[in-house]
């Protein structure tokens, strides 16, 4: 009995090349091999050219026909296919790096999303893990579409990569904070009470209290620092069945904080599962009826139109009368100033000293 050949090459070689050499050594054609194995000539040709893989069944047949072990054929095949996969992976890694560079690297590093000591391809892998996708194509199909559905101000540069980064940061934080089931009716009932929190001496405490109020209705509130090229003031994002209001404190004043919060609540009360960043345009120039409705809701909750008209008929606009109106309405003076500015009743910078400044990281 002829001893079965056991030979393992030390270099990488395609199984098809070994097969062609083995046939030449034996003076056997591919057609003859096909007959001996009872396999179509096309199959033998595809194995020889690397178009078809050697299966365990084929490896056993080659062992019986040519005297070269099935283990050797399968080892060649595995190493060859692995080498091909690694070549493809190397190309993909370069594509991943190109994708990584579309994001603001400084913020990826400062937020700990990627590690400073990682290689560039590893940073791309870390960013993919952050987004919960396997490759940039998966990111484009999921996060690219989500980011595109959010509407930003057209007055500034907007990057969908930056938008997605901001939204995912908020989503990951929301995922770690379970809240009760969403109750729209309860939200409608409790929302007006939020206006009084604007007068709190410590704004951080007021925001914490607002979070608890919203949580009782199954809605979340997150303050997520904005991302470069994602000029957002606020958004609503649904996470595991609950709406989360995301605020950036982009303008860093108390009037913007409470207006943005109630604007997003206005969207939720409309019953629309929308995920849009409110575009920052003056009232009266909002093309989207839903955006105007959310603006009107926030305006009316913070300072009712009827009350403002009565006040304007009977008072001149100065610091003391603004403070008096704010006290009578139970809101912060900055809210009155912001309203007068938005309605064009005073210049944009006038009485800004009555607003309270905010630290988006505070």
Image (cartoon, grey):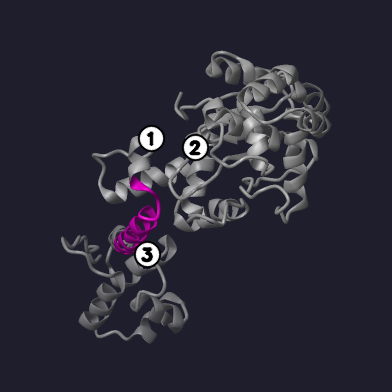
Residue range of the region highlighted in magenta in the rendering: 80-105
Location of mark 1 (residue): 111
Q: Give the quadrant of residue 337.
A: top right
In the image, 205 versus 312, the foreground residue is 312
**SS assignment for the magenta stretch, majority:** helix
Q: Report x, y in % for residue 179.
A: 66, 23
Tell me the element at label 1: loop
Dot 1 crowding, Cα within 10 Å, few <14, some 14–19, many 20+: few
Identify the secondary structure beneath mark 2. helix
Question: Which quadrant does the N terminus fall into?
Answer: bottom left
Q: Which residue does the image show at 49% across and 27% down from the upper left?
A: 358
Q: Where is residue 306 drawn, in percent x and y? A: 84, 32
User: Foreground mark, 2 or 3?
Assistant: 2
Is residue 99 inside the magenta stretch?
yes
Q: Earlier in the sequence, mark 2 or mark 3?
A: 3
Measure the C-alpha gap from mark 1 to mark 3.
52 Å
Q: Check disc 2: other Cα within 10 Å, few if <14, some if 14-19, many if 20+.
A: some
Question: Horizontal and vertical percent for residue 230?
Answer: 50, 48
Looking at marks 2 and 1 on the same chain, the residue that comes earlier in the sequence is marked by: 1
Where residue 173 sits in the image (x, y, percent)?
52, 30
Is 185 placed left or right of 230 in the picture?
right
Q: Nearer the viewer, residue 339 or 177?
A: 339
The verdict on residue 48 being magenta is no
Instruction: Identify residue for label 2.
Output: 169
Pointer 3 residue: 59
Measure the alpha-carbon separation of dots 2 and 3.
51 Å
Residue 146 against residue 337 in the figure, above or below: below
Image quadrant assignment for residue 82: bottom left
């Amino acid at each position: 009995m002829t001893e079965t050949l056991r030979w393992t090459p030390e270099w990488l070689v395609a199984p098809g090349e070994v097969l062609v050499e083995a046939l030449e050594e034996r003076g056997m054609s591919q057609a003859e091999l096909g007959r001996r194995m009872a396999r179509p000539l096309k199959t033998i040709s595809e194995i020889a050219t690397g178009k078809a893989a050697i299966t365990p069944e084929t490896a056993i047949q080659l062992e019986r026909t040519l005297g070269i072990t099935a283990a050797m054929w399968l080892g060649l095949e595995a190493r060859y296919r692995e080498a091909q996969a690694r070549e493809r992976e190397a190309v993909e890694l370069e594509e991943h790096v190109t994708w990584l560079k579309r994001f603001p690297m400084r913020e990826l590093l400062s937020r700990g999303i990627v590690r400073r000591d990682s290689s560039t391809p590893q940073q791309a892998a870390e960013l993919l893990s952050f987004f919960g996708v396997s490759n940039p194509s998966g990111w484009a199909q999921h996060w690219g579409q989500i980011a595109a559905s959010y509407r930003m101000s057209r007055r500034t540069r907007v990057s969908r990569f930056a938008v997605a980064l901001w939204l995912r940061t908020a989503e990951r934080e929301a995922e770690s904070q379970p809240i009760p089931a969403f109750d729209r009716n309860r939200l409608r009932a409790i929302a007006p009470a939020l206006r009084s929190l604007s007068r709190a001496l410590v704004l951080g405490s007021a925001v914490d209290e607002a979070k608890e109020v919203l949580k009782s209705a199954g809605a979340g509130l997150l303050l997520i620092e904005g991302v470069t090229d994602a000029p957002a003031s606020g958004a609503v994002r649904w996470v595991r069945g609950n709406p989360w209001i995301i605020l950036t404190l982009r303008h860093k004043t108390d009037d913007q904080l409470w207006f943005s919060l109630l604007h997003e609540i206005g969207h939720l009360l409309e019953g629309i599962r929308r995920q849009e960043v409110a575009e920052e345009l003056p009232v009266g120039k909002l093309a989207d009826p839903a955006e105007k409705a959310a603006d009107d809701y926030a305006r009316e909750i913070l300072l009712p139109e009827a009350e403002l008209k009565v006040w304007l008929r009977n008072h001149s606009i100065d610091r003391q009368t603004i403070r008096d109106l704010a006290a009578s309405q139970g809101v912060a003076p900055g809210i009155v100033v912001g309203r007068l500015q938005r309605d064009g009743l005073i210049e944009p910078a006038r009485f800004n000293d009555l607003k309270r400044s905010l630290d988006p990281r505070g």
